[in-house]
Amino acid sequence: MTQLDKKQYTITKQPKSTIEIVGEVPANIIELYREPAFAAFAERVEVDGFRKGNAPKEAVMKKIGAMALLEEMAQRALTDIYFDIVQSNAIDAIGRPNIVITKIAEGSPLGFTITTAVIPDINLPDYKKIAKEQNKEVKTPEVTDEEIDHAILELRKMRAHQEMHENNVEHHDHNHQAIEEKDLPELTDELVKKFGPFENVADFKTKLADNMKKEKEFRDRDARRMAVVEAMITESAVEVPDMLVEYEIDKILGQMDYDVSMAGMKMDDYLKSINKTIADMRNDFKDEATKRSAMQLVINKVVTTEKLDPTEDEINAEVAKIMEFYKNTQGVNTDQARAYVTTVLTNQKFFEFLDAQK
């Protein structure tokens, strides 16, 4: 790993649990990255008359230019240097660092500024007591006949709407809510078997009631869990780094972009339809992103304190399942799967720990 002498950089604390690292990298260290940087370009650059990876060095260099190669060398060096600085100075960095090159020239020292968020000091409240208080509120939910009847009515309307589409019946694109009672299918043994593996109407109603009860239990459980976490966030007054909030906003927008594309639209068109810009959306999501970031910081702190981290075996088992499921999907790699699984399992263990406080 590339290392700098501690005299070659300074670390300064910034507001909101952020640090700034400013320094210079000697030219001889940057030079160590010339070959791997060039090899990366050679593998992906297209040169007329040659297959990728087989073009002469001179042809590749003419295609990319000396400055592009130097910038690639600098980025690779700074990535290694950042991780070395974090490790050697025991910095609890979180999120993605913002790496800025401030000075670059062939044969000269490389100037850089790196800004990164660090885990803030979190003074946890008595979270076990908070969880116990919330867990006292656990009640057995009831499902009324009216709720069951309403759910059945909704299913009959949805089925009628589906049949209109299947039979090319003109219905002016109205949704299932507008379908009148006289146009709904009768609740029969034959109909409920179309909804799923039900023997008859009585069996369907029994299982429907059970499922509705379980849904209520899950909603109540989730509400209690969130009440505990929100109380912990409030009492600990956790300071959320701005960089972490921006990273969380990026994730929210990424999911939104995916959802919009699944609906057959482009993000730009969607934004025009609601008369908003990306900047507007980032501002709209700021509070939610801050809350999510604070929640994850608190969760991670409790997990560390209580030693609830998932084991390597648990993580590896779940990663294997994901990679098998997405084995024919491009863009899914092991590192992404591991990061996702680690977060999911960590949160799961945290909430199970809260649920166990009686």
Image (cartoon, rainbow, N blue to C red):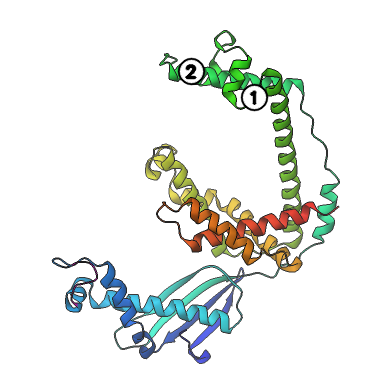
Name the disc covering residue 92, or none: none
Q: Residues within 10 Å of mark 2 (few under 14, many from 20)?
A: few
**Residue projecting furthest to the top:** 182
Counting from the top left corner in percent of width and height, residue 152 is at: 65, 20
Residue at coordinates 82% horizontally, 61% vertically from top-left? 126
Q: Mark 1: which amino acid?
A: Phe
**Are the two marked residues, 1 and 2, in contact with CB atoms closer than 8 angstroms?**
no
- Name which residue lies at 34% across and 75% down: 72
| Name of the residue lying farthest toward the left | 49
Residue 260 visible in the current orientation: yes
Q: Name the front one of labels 1 and 2.
A: 1
> Residue 71: x and y, percent?
33, 76
Label 1 SS = loop
Q: Is residue 325 magenta?
A: no
User: Quick check: 127 above or below 325?
Assistant: below
* Local secondary structure at mark 2: helix
Name the residue at the front extreme.
199
Give neighbour class at mark 1: few <14, some 14-19, many 20+ (Cα, 10 Å): some
Tell me: 112 left or right of 288.
left
**Residue tagged by mark 1?**
198
Nearer the N terminus, badge 1 or badge 2?
Answer: 2
Specify start and end residues of the magenta stretch as a single range: 51-56
Provide the residue designation for mark 2.
163
Q: Position of residue 84 (x, y in %)?
A: 52, 82
